[in-house]
């Protein structure tokens, strides 16, 4: 028990270093090379290359090592490492591997509890909704779309049959599932950055009841999960900066105060 409390205390301390909205705004307001320098100032791992994939992989490796050292729950390690794998830039990640990752993560989530399971289901939903949005924009037929969707979310694959008119609004209307409403609305307004922010907030709020228990692994979960979310935001910023894409500062979500 004392080891678990100690590990959670370490995680609590490290969570203080999560990037605040102000730090993310500073990052998004500079150029690409300076952003890499700023991130190392903030404690990000250095890499031998300014290639975004190489740089971000160094961060994922750091968090993976932290989990191995400080997390004594095999299921939680598996749950969180699956989150890292899902955002990995590895060229070996393909649809079939992602399908297996989602499937395995659902099994692990069931062991951890209902909030974890809902988180994993919503994660699949959000991935599928984004795929549906892109398919509608491209005018793909329903069979082509369903071949690119993952099973296991709260939205079944059959639910997507209502997209025969190539309008995401039809799916949103048919489902009427309040937790996903904000994410749907963002896509209906063709605002991908707002979709991303709404999705991160939804996932954060789904597991937030688990964050406070020192007798389990709440603080460690909070730190790791929000660091993973931060990685996605940082990767988004770096890609935008490298390609000279304007960043909407209001779209940058952070769990840090």
Image (cartoon, rainbow, N blue to C red):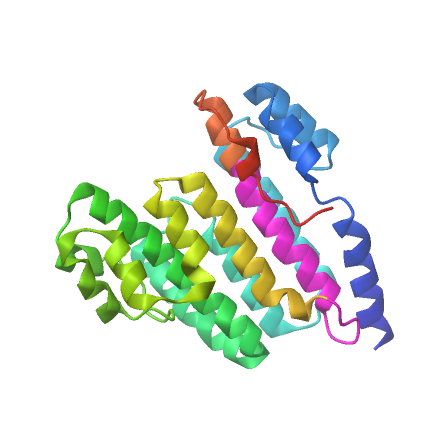
Q: Residue at x 61, y 69 (%)?
A: 76
Residue 170 in view in this figure: yes
Horizontal side of 217 relative to 248 (left or right) equals right
Instruction: Name the one closer to the observer, 173 or 117.
Output: 173
- Please tell me whether residue 111 is drawn above or below residue 129 in the rendered image: below
Q: Position of residue 92 (x, y in %)?
A: 37, 49
Going 46% across and 76% down the picture, which residue do you hit? 107
Q: Is residue 12 magenta?
A: no
The residue range painted magenta reads 212-235
Which quadrant: the N terminus?
bottom right
Q: Is residue 45 visible?
A: no
Residue 7 locus on image (x, y percent): 79, 64
In the rendered picture of this protein, how many numbered marks are placed on residues?
A: 0
Type of secondary structure dominating the magenta stretch: helix
Residue 64's image quarter?
Answer: bottom right
Residue sitting nearer the eye, 230 or 101? 230
In the depicted structure, whether residue 162 falls above or below residue 59 = below
- Most distant residue in the right direction: 2
> Is residue 190 left or right of 23 when viewed as pictured?
left
How far across and how far down the image is residue 138, in percent?
19, 42
Please tell me which residue lies in front, 230 or 77: 230
């Amino acid at each position: 028990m004392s080891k678990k409390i100690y590990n959670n205390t370490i995680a609590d301390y490290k969570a203080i270093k999560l990037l605040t909205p102000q730090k993310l705004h500073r990052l998004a307001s500079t150029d690409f090379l300076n952003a890499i320098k700023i991130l190392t100032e903030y404690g990000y791992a250095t890499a031998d290359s300014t290639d975004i994939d190489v740089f971000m992989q160094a961060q994922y490796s750091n968090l993976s090592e932290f989990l191995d050292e400080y997390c004594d729950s095999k299921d939680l390690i598996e749950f969180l490492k699956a989150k890292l794998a899902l955002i990995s830039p590895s060229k070996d990640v393909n649809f079939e591997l992602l399908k297996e990752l989602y499937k395995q993560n659902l099994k692990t989530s069931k062991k951890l509890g209902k909030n974890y399971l809902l988180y994993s289901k919503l994660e699949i939903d959000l991935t599928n909704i984004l795929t549906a949005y892109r398919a509608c924009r491209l005018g793909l037929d329903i069979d082509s779309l369903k071949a690119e969707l993952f099973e296991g979310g709260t939205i079944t694959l059959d639910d997507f049959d209502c997209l025969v008119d190539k309008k995401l609004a039809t799916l949103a209307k048919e489902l009427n599932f309040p937790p996903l409403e904000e994410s749907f609305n963002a896509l209906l307004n063709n605002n991908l950055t707002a979709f991303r922010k709404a999705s991160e907030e939804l996932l954060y709020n789904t597991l937030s009841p688990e964050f406070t228990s020192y007798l389990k692994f709440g603080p460690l979960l909070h730190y790791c999960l929000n660091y993973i979310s931060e990685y996605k935001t940082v990767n988004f910023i770096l890609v935008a900066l490298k390609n000279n894409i304007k960043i909407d500062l209001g779209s940058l979500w952070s769990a840090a105060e």
